[in-house]
């Protein structure tokens, strides 16, 4: 497996590069890979805003129930996509309410 992701890398190579990792920390050390905690899977994720990948792709993770539990960089293994979206919405709503 190649260490660096290049534009010449095929989808299959990208999948293999991610699936090789069996822990969240090692998975998130690899560019364009994210961790699905319920199935313990390191999956390819080349979205520009990785924690929003479940909004654009229904099958980011192997199990549908873990789509929004996706772990990504730079947030790390302790913060899910759902937690991030909830925090952003809460802060945005609070600021909007305060301004009005």
Image: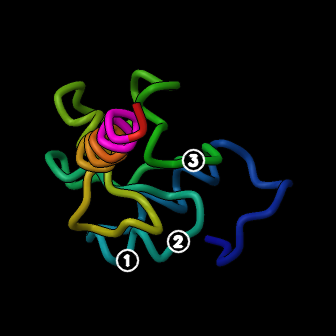
Magenta residue check for 10: no
Q: Does the CB distance between marks 2 and 1 fall below 8 Å?
A: yes
Residue 60, placed above or below residue 23: above
Work out how far the residue at label 2 is from the one at label 1, CA to CA, in angstroms.
7 Å
Colour scheme of the rendered structure: rainbow
Mark sitting earlier along the chain (1/3): 1
Q: Which mark is residue 30?
A: 2
Mark 2 secondary-structure assignment: loop
Q: Secondary structure at mark 3?
A: loop
Q: Which quadrant, please, contains the C terminus? A: top left
Q: Earlier in the sequence, mark 2 or mark 3?
A: 2
Picture disc at residue 49: 3
| Picture quadrant of residue 89 | top left
The answer to whether mark 2 and mark 3 are in CB contact below 8 A is no
For label 2, count other residues whose C-alpha is less than 10 Å away and answer few (under 14), some (14-19) or many (20+). some
Between the residue at mark 2 and the residue at mark 3, the CA separation in whole angstroms equals 16 Å
Query: Residue 39: image x %, image y %?
Result: 18, 46
- The magenta-colored residue range is 92-98
According to the picture, the residue beneath numbered tag 1 turns out to be 26
Badge 3 local density, few (<14 within 10 Å), some, or many (20+)? few
Q: Nearer the viewer, residue 70 or 59?
A: 70
Position of 17 with respect to 9 (left or right) is left
Asked whether 93 falls inside the magenta stretch, the response is yes
Mark number displayed over residue 53: none
Q: Residue at left 61%, top 71%?
A: 1
């Amino acid at each position: 497996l190649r260490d660096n992701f290049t534009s010449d890398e095929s989808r299959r190579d990208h999948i293999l590069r991610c699936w090789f990792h069996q822990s969240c920390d090692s998975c998130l050390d690899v560019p364009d890979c994210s961790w699905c905690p319920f199935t313990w899977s390191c999956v390819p994720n080349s979205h520009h805003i990785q924690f929003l990948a479940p909004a654009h792709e229904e099958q980011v993770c192997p199990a549908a129930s873990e789509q929004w539990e996706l772990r990504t960089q730079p947030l790390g293994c302790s913060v899910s996509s759902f937690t991030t979206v909830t925090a952003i919405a809460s802060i945005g709503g609070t600021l909007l309410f305060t301004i009005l």
